[in-house]
Image (cartoon, grey):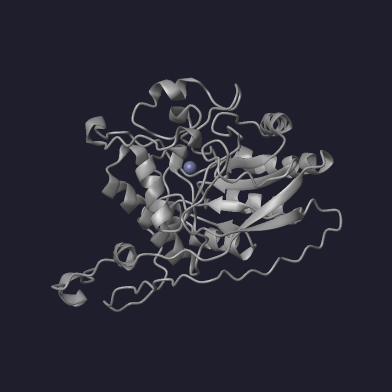
Amino acid sequence: MRKLPFLFVAGAVTAVVAAGAGAWHVFGPGDVQADAKAKNTKGELTTASIDTRWPKPASNAPAEPAPRPQPVAAAPSAAPMQAQPVAEKRQAYVKPACNNPNALGVSRTVQIDTTGGPGLGMSQYRDYDFLQPGEVVLTFDDGPWPVTTPAVLNALAAQCVQAVFFPIGKHSTWHPAVLKQVLAAGHSVGTHTWSHQNLASKTPQEAKDEIERGISAITLMAGQPLSPFFRFPQLRQNAELKAYLAERNIAAFSIDIDSEDFRIHKADKLVASMMEKLKKKGKGILLMHDLHKWSAAAVPDLLAQLKAGGYKIVHIRAKDTLSTLPQYDAAIAAELQPVRTSNARPISSVIQTVD
Ligand SMILES: [Zn+2]
């Protein structure tokens, strides 16, 4: 994860004025910084100081991820890897066993019918205020990542808590085994684009490609259907993109409480900050990033403090599974397939042992 240069020409962006001013609301100081509004000139629906929201790489992260995606099937033949379109269907769920009688646990599991693309998270969407006072939903973005994502999973498992994860497509192709660990632990897994671009700065087609490539890649790497949940990178969106998600029956997840773990790099300070914001707001969807080592380190103490404070964890599940689009499945599968050219010569005529 590194900061990508924003090379996009502002004039190329189709400015879509956010429909319904009530859909966007600025919370008080501490939640949303005022400068976001000043910069919000393109009809984006945003929260916070978006320019600072790009997650910085964790210091324990490799400088450069593995350059080659890991093919799922090691088929030696020239036949392209077949992507299996995932049919929309009801999502099966078996609640994981809990062996810790003193665990925080999940107090309530809610099922979301994503038909029509509902928006969740009161900082950007105001239709569904479904959490009761004291209820918290844990969400983790930008994985899967080695070390840090498994550390988060361990901390959640120790307290028998389920969360919602929003992995990035590229990261999923680099670390599919970690992605599968997240799913195996019973968490809900949505998507967070192919490469974490600011979609509000893209053309509609580019933005759609980012969304769909992420969905197809993560589904392919997961080897199973995902939840039709999506979170916009940096929470940047516009009405047209939200409408696209609605068309695809994908719920858009915003937030209620930002951990701001992009700037708070000490676990104890991060926990103190999150608890302070939670105390002020009383409930909400909490945003963290499972690719930061300080965020992973903060989870055990966060859960302990949530339990001590009498907070309740709500787990969000989807009623139906996420469907992929076949053309994007095929494109992603072709990209991940090692290249074989049709005019390749026999190996012995190209490569010979000479010494
Ligand atoms: Zn993100």
Which residue is depicted at the point 86% across and 58% down?
101
Left or right: residue 243 compared with residue 276: left
Left or right: residue 13 compared with residue 129: left
Residue farthest left in this picture = 343
Coordinates of residue 169 in the picture (x, y in percent) = 42, 54
Q: 118 or 274, which lies in front?
A: 118
Instruction: State which quadrant residue 261 falls in.
Output: top right
Residue farthest right in this picture = 101
Left or right: residue 346 compared with residue 97: left
Across the whole image, how many numbered discs are drawn on residues? 0
Q: Is residue 185 above or below residue 208?
A: below
Coordinates of residue 160 in the picture (x, y in percent) = 75, 56
Instruction: State which quadrant residue 300 falls in.
Output: top right
Q: 299 or 50, which lies in front?
A: 50
Q: Is residue 300 above or below residue 315?
A: above
Coordinates of residue 25 in the picture (x, y in percent) = 52, 31
Coordinates of residue 349 in the picture (x, y in percent) = 15, 75
Quarter of the picture containing the C terminus is bottom left
The answer to whether residue 194 is visible is no
Which residue is depicted at the point 51% across and 58% down?
114
The answer to whether residue 232 is visible is yes
Q: 204 or 62, which lies in front?
A: 204
Quarter of the picture containing the N terminus is top left
